[in-house]
Amino acid sequence: MTSETQERRPLFKPVRGVTLAGLIGALAFACGVALTATSGWLIVRASERPVVLTLLTAIVAVRAFGIGRPVFRYVERLVSHNAALADLTDRRTAAYRQLVPLTPARLGTKRRADLLSGVVRDLDDEVDIQVRVVVPLITTVGAALVAVVTTFVVHPPAGFVVLGSVVAAALVGWIDLALERRGQAASLAARGQVDRVAHLVASGANELGAIRATDEPMTWLAYAQKNVEKAAFAQSRGRAAGVALALAVTGVATLAMAWVLDGEVEAGTINGPFAALLLLTPLALGDVVGLIPDAVGSLARSSAARDRLEALLTQEPAVRDSGSEAAPDETVPHLRVRDLTASWTGEKTDLGPVTLDVAPGEHIAVTGPNGCGKSTLLAVLARHLDPTGGTYAWGERDVRDLPLDAVRDGIAFVDDDPHLFAGSLRANLLLARPDADDTDGLRALERAGLGPWLAELGEGLDTHLGEYLVSAGRSGAESVATATERSISGGERARLGIARALLSERPVILLDEPVAHLDGPTADAVVRDLLTASAGRTVVMVSHHPIAFDALDRVIDLPAVTS
């Protein structure tokens, strides 16, 4: 576990503002109960045709409760949602911080759809517990407590009936929770299947369309969706049973109250208006009891989401940040690897043993057969993965003795598919160095060979790389460029990734198949431009093909892995 990992908050612990929202909600429901009960008293008492002045207090009370209920309800919603959204912001930021040490070694084994579901949907579901469970729980307990205490004070036998209905409602909630949890696992599995199939179909849509092979994947998606519908139907039956039980509790409590009051009214112990007030109290509490099924469903969903998120965020990072020595003094470090071995899973060796010296400012290529560990070597050099054996040193010091950020701050990493965000060209460049000005950005683009391309852009660095057009350029599809949006070709994408590396001014540049998707002449030109612009920096490039190898200082042929 890293220092970024935060202790998980207890599931039911309210965040700031939620307790206040729950108490305000309790006032809203208490007003509802009082409104129903007082209205009953007023109707029955008015039927006796008393002096109107004797009804004024009840009339004012009905108005006050009628106004108070929606006002308190509105304030409760405002306070609770404000608190929940603030909590979601904090939790999402914390979750992303916890994901950073897991990238890419621990997250690379996750399906993208599962990962996206974990950091978006599961986090939303977990935070939902504040609004959908904690607030209703405080509201229900508060309103029920007011009703029980009040009825006990004014008429103890009626108080026992109300208390019994509250206990029965709690039992209904417990039964409903058991039913919800039973169906939650099937629902999550079905939703995960839909996410995975949908991601596969969407990511391969162009290829599937080109060979007219969309029918079978769509059949898979339809089958996965049917499983979701089956799971939802099973859950809805359990939820319907919970709603029916809640209504039954309200009905039985009302009948029990009528039975208790019947004899006392006949005996004249209590009058009709007072009996009406007490009789309608269990019925008014039905609104409070009605919160239970939805709250229980949200609790089951939030609990399952929390477990999934916990499994994702509490993985052991592939890199330990235990270094305490000062950052290296060298402007461009000497990279020394001795008998290095590494593994992504710990179950088998994915690299090595490898011995390699890279002098400051040297440009080398690493090649070799598939599976020999080329990308794994770059991951170790970039401090994305700890070695399982041997040493890796910057100058004379082992990198594990140096702070993780100090090493990573000296490395620019470019892979075969640099990610471009839907935003301006400037914003995409500034990811590499936020304090860079426009002059720095323009120079980086020029050095990456994008000067002519930039000159064609009417808006320069303000050109918007739209989300659709970025995706279109990645797949090579044709798009119509507008004055503010520009599609990106594969070569332009690769050069933009290199421009970011150059703009970062980091002394070490690691390239993992940076031109894998480009044609030969374009790939050769991109690599040569990079090497020219990287004079004085260390460059280590992994490549399956001999692209511009004559412009490199050395080519290392990585041997096959030995167990």
Image (tube, grey):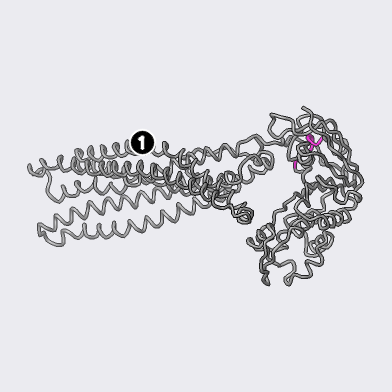
Q: Is residue 370 left or right of residue 531?
A: left
Q: Is residue 142 left or right of residue 445?
A: left
* Residue located beneath label 1 in the image: 174
In magenta stretch: residue 400 = yes
- How many circles with numbers are drawn on the protein? 1
Q: Is residue 339 above or below residue 459?
A: above
Task: Where is residue 405? Give x, y as percent.
Answer: 75, 43
Mark 1 residue type = Trp
Q: Is residue 17 left or right of residue 119?
A: left
Quadrant (top left/top right/bottom left/bottom right) for the N terminus:
top right
Task: Where is residue 344? Give x, y as percent.
Answer: 70, 35
| Residue stretch in magenta | 398-404
| SS label for mark 1 | helix
Q: Residue furthest front?
A: 212
Q: Of residues 450 and 475, which is closer to you in this image?
A: 475
In magenta stretch: residue 103 = no
Residue depicted at 44% across the width and 48% down the height? 131
- Snapshot quadrant of residue 44: bottom left
Task: Where is residue 332? Give x, y as percent.
Answer: 87, 46
Quadrant (top left/top right/bottom left/bottom right) for the C terminus:
top right
Can residue 141 be spotted in the picture?
no
